[in-house]
Amino acid sequence: MNELKYVGKRIIREDVYDKARGKTEYTCDRTLHNMLYAKLVLSEKAKAEVTIHTEKALVVPGIEAVFTHADVPDKKYNPHNWNATINCEKDMYILSEKARYVGDHLALVVGKSKEAVEEACALVEIEYQEEMPVIGLKAARETEDALLFEKELKCGDYEALEKEEMLVVETKGSTQMIHHGPIEPHIALAEIDEVGNLVLWTPCQSVFLNRFQISELLDIPYSRIRVVKATMGGSFGGKGLSVVEPACAFAAWTLKKPVLLYMDRPADIMGTRRRNSSEMKIQSAFTRDGKMIGRRIDCDFDGGAYYTNGSAIAMAFSKKLFRLYRIENQTVHARTFYTNTIPGGSCRGYGSPQAHAVTEINLDQAAAKLGLDPCELRLRNIVHPQDPDPTGGTNLGDARIEECILKGMETFGWKEKRAHIKEKDTDRFAYGVGMACGVHGNGYKGGYPDFTNVHIQLHPDGCVEVKLAVHEQGCGTVMTMQQIAAEALHMDVYKIRVHEADTFISPYDSAGTQASRVTYVMGGAVQKAGEALLEKIKKACSILYGWKIEEIQTENGLAWVEGEQGKTYQEIAVDYEKQCSRYLHVMIEHEPESNPGVYCAAFAEVKVDKYTGQVEVLDLVAAHDVGQCMNATLSEGQVEGGAQMSLGQALFEEIQVDAKGNVKSRNFSKYHMINAPDMPKVRSVFIENHNTDGPYGAKSLGEVVAVAPAPAVANAINFALGSAFSHYPITPEKVVAFLENQEKK
């Protein structure tokens, strides 16, 4: 590959200065003329018929309306249906007719001030006729009609194996409900513009998803709905499906006034979405030399109170288990159940954190029984570049998991640390090392329609405007698109303007900023469009100046041929418009050719306090198969942020629900996220082999970073203590209970 000038470089984002100075305007900072405020009244019961009394709330000064189920359209929807091609079961209303979980949306209070709204919310009286809720998977499995979805994927025949001739390792484990934890809770702002269009500003991950759902629910033509991606204060998948947008749009459309609908932190935890919890059993069969001949995985997911992503999460989980190791005989049986808890939804990694959390512990247990180094066992079984997908999806592409493991081992000092780590043990502290691998994808190809459109234009001032439905989530996706366009056009990255998604401006996009598709799918589209525009610029030079196209050279926004004075892109654009009555632009539609795997390996050293059960992560190396690193600074930020989220899964984070469905961890004093002072130094390793299908060889990174650290830490704890923890999170209480039990033996 030719030397890249912009891609891969540590170029500073243009939005960082305002964000650092607190000057960035978020949705909560906006004020419109005659704007009203709105807040949802959430259910306090997990399952109940409800009668809602609004009389006291309505007489609060400044209150404009209190809406209930009786006021909203009698239409069901599913926030997972982001366009007309997806048809999961519709079972939600804008406001619910009965309570299905603590946090369900029962009423909407709208008023002239937040103070009035808060007062009125407290005065909405709800009579509950409670029913016995279904809480947890054990209860769901015993409840008629609780099964939401069931699917089995397989290759070969695991059941037919002669297992008595093999080592069979069985592991039972679970993963917990997790909150996304964005700095900015859910919020939306809607108004009717001067020509009667509904305009919605939302820090979402798909403007077209919200337009589709609002059009369906409110019977408003697509052409009269404008959804604008607002500046976002974090998402991590939590803003991938609509939450507050339909209610906000309904209120503004009904009252014909601007409405700002906001959530506070407890509402954001209880009344939105969460990562699906899971319980699973794994059986792995090995030959005595460490080849995995077969594996069976049975996994149940807690889908929560509504269908949402119940089928999608089970399928995503299942398919990823066929893309990391070569297993000739594998069966994955996945089920999702309804419960009376917070509905499941998109969360960073989408099935991968659950898929590898327990399977990677199972592999370490197998390695111990086989007398093999955990890395060696994995190296004997990993997939190879261009391996087929046993489930029939696109092949695995330039899969570089071997390099991830080997380079990670080298950087971490794996062999030396593992050989001598127990020498550091004291009466109080135990030390251990562990590792784990993971895989994710690059978009939806093979599952859902996946394409995007880009319009790119060279303006007479020499700047380039790129229009596509990209949604900046705070991780630098806009700068990534700028760098790709700059590379394609051979011009200054800061002379390129990339607009975020706006349904009145952006060309149509099939899926939004989710599923790790931005760099691979949208970036691929921007590269293609940029290269096409460069060719158009060269053709313009041929027409205008008589240059031979094959002789034209371009660099730094300048075109020339040997022996002729060069022309700036600005001059070319002006001359072309003046002489040809045309402007230089390209519109393209792009569908990726494949959906390769993106791979990772994490290595962790831990220190366990045997008195308190506290676990400290001392060192973490995270190696990722990125194809081509787009911006090292942004990539390192992704790795560190993903590690923080994954370590939270391993040790701290859990939405806790009691037997009646009450959410016990409804704020950050009860929902424990790993704090900055407790984070270890994260050492990033990027494997760059320039996967040919992605833009300049790049693959995704944003979600796979949150996969492997959790099981790597779990394996390190188990190595330190001689334990077999496989139920997340591994809290101090669990560690102490294990140690006390060991003392009794």
Image: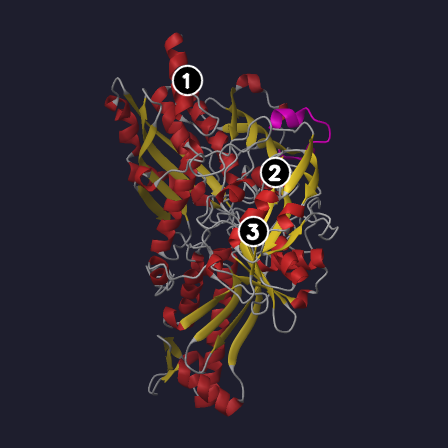
351 to the left or right of 86:
left
Query: How are the residues colored?
Result: secondary structure
Q: Looking at the rendering, which quadrant does residue 153 occupy?
A: top right
471 or 325: which is nearer to us?
471
SS at mark 3? helix
Mark 3 or 1, which is nearer the eye? 3
**Mark 3 neighbour class, 10 Å CA radius: few under 14, some 14 to 19, many 20 or more:** many
Q: Is residue 386 magenta?
A: no
Is residue 434 placed above or below 626 in the rendered structure? above
Count the marks: 3
Residue depth check, mark 1 versus mark 2: number of the one nearer the observer: 1
Inter-mark Cα distance, 2 to 3: 39 Å
Residue 119: horizontal and vertical position, in percent? 55, 47
Which element type, helix, strand or loop, lies under badge 2?
helix
In the picture of the structure, the residue carrying the numbered disc 1 is 737
Please state, as top left, top right, bottom left or bottom right, where the C terminus lies in the image.
Answer: top left
Looking at numbered disc 1 in the image, what kind of residue is underneath it?
Ala
Residue nearer the viewer, 590 or 108? 108
Which corner quadrant of the image does residue 622 belong to? top left
Tag 2 residue: 314
Q: Amino acid at mark 3?
A: Val
Vertical placement of residue 141 versus 56, above or below: above
Q: Residues within 10 Å of mark 1 (few under 14, many from 20)?
A: few
Range drawn in magenta: 136-155
**x%, y% of residue 28?**
48, 57
The residue wearing badge 3 is 117
User: Label 2 sits on what residue type?
Assistant: Ala
Local crowd at mark 2 within 10 Å, few (<14), some, or many (≥20)? many
Is residue 323 at least partly visible in the picture?
A: no
Q: Is residue 165 above or below residue 276?
A: above
Disc 2 vs disc 3: which is toward the camera? 3
